[in-house]
Image (cartoon, rainbow, N blue to C red):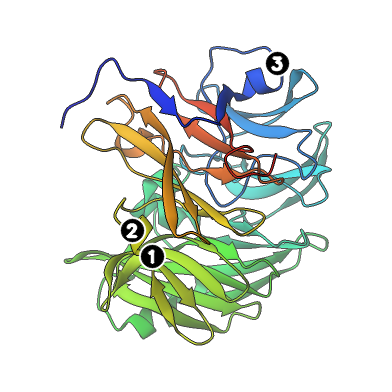
Amino acid sequence: MYADRDFVYEVADDTELSDVPSQYDAESFTAERFFGYFDVHPWTSSMDKMLLHEITSDEVKIIIFQNQESVYLTSSSAWNLQQGTRAQWHPTGESVLLNDLKSGNLIAKEINSSGELISTHARPIQAVHPDGKEYLSLNYDRLDRNRPDYGYGLDRGSLPSPESDGLWKVDLESGNEEFLISLESLIERADTSVDPDNHYVNHVLYNPSGERFVFLHRWRGEEGRVSRLYVSDRDGNCWVVMDESVVSHYCWLSDSELFVWGRTREFGNGYHIIDIDSGYIKYVDTLSEWGDGHPSLSPNRRYIITDTYPDRKRQRHLLLYDREEDDVVKIGSFFEPLKYTGITRCDLHPRWSPDGTAISFDSTHTGRRESYILDVGELVNQS
């Protein structure tokens, strides 16, 4: 492994890069900032406000950037460097949903844009329904045990039994919760004797209509990490759609199509398009040669933005895939210092803006963690 010490970053012609404070003409501070995962974006639908996490120490501040200023919203002790607090705008754009700790217990809370508490719920958020009326929850203690980069660093001893652990649905209006899918049922289908404590679910994502959701069942055995990709209806009736041990990141292309990095017997490792109703699988050869990444679909459904892990030069790349032309363009490369590795790594996690003209991503190419906006309007002919 080697690095070009003189390289910091480069972006494609017809794009423009700025950090978030500069984009909003707001004062910038020395604290590190980031947004989080790639499955939600930081803007309101009108794009007049943007959310970021600001690292203070053991807590993070939730900051809103708007109207040439940054405004403190709230703080949280339930966060990690990969997904933050799962902070996201309610679909109305009038409040923010996120996870926090209260009396040692993980909770979800809803805060209005003035920082006033609207409600709290006894289970933390994993995925919010597109209509904002419910969310899905999982056991973050299991992530602490098995994938600490996605957990909240809580050491709470033994885990609950698989029959009482898994996925829950929580009504945001009434607070009622429903146990949807037990981990025990997933373990039985996997037909494995691996210790139940080594099993967990993660990466839950609703489809555009909210009628279905996708998730990973994973476990750690002698063969390493094994993954099975499930799709479920809203009542918890679920089925396997990818089962060759390797599945990582995905996004929905439609209510019935998934874009997935994983392994199939026919094609091996790479990006696949899976029709979850027919079972038909198409391999995306053009993009797969770049390796695993975090894909997101543009609002007009023509483009996919994804990223790469660091190459031999410690450079992470932003890739724009044109679905109509089956063409890939590298639109950015960003150096990652060696101090950002393992659990402290900073994946780019690219996210589309609601109007499809900009990409939000996190990076450490300047030597500190910061969130950026790349204007791609001219590149995608949408400006």
> Where is residue 72 drawn, in percent x and y?
72, 24
> Where is residue 37 drawn, in percent x and y?
52, 45
Residue with the mark numbered 2: 288
Instruction: Tell me the SS state at disc 3.
Output: loop
Q: Quadrant of residue 71?
A: top right
15 or 314, nearer to the observer: 15
In the rendering, which numbered label is found on residue 284? Answer: 1
Look at the image and tell me whether residue 199 can be seen: no
Identify residue type, mark 3.
Ala
In the rendering, which numbered label is found on residue 97? Answer: none
Look at the image and tell me whether residue 263 can be seen: yes
Instruction: Tell me the SS state at disc 1.
Output: loop
The alpha-carbon separation of the residues under discs 2 and 1 comes to: 6 Å
- Mark 2 touches mark 1? (CB < 8 Å): yes
Residue at 61% across / 58% down in the picture? 127
Label 3 Cα crowd, 10 Å radius (few <14 / some 14-19 / many 20+): some
Identify residue type, mark 1.
Val
The alpha-carbon separation of the residues under discs 1 and 3 comes to: 41 Å
- 6 relative position to 358: left or right: left
Residue at 66% across / 68% down in the picture? 169
The alpha-carbon separation of the residues under discs 2 and 3 comes to: 39 Å
Residue at 80% across / 41% down in the picture? 46
Residue with the mark numbered 3: 26
Q: Image height check: is 57 above or below 297?
A: above
> Where is residue 133 drawn, in percent x and y?
78, 62
Figure disc tally: 3
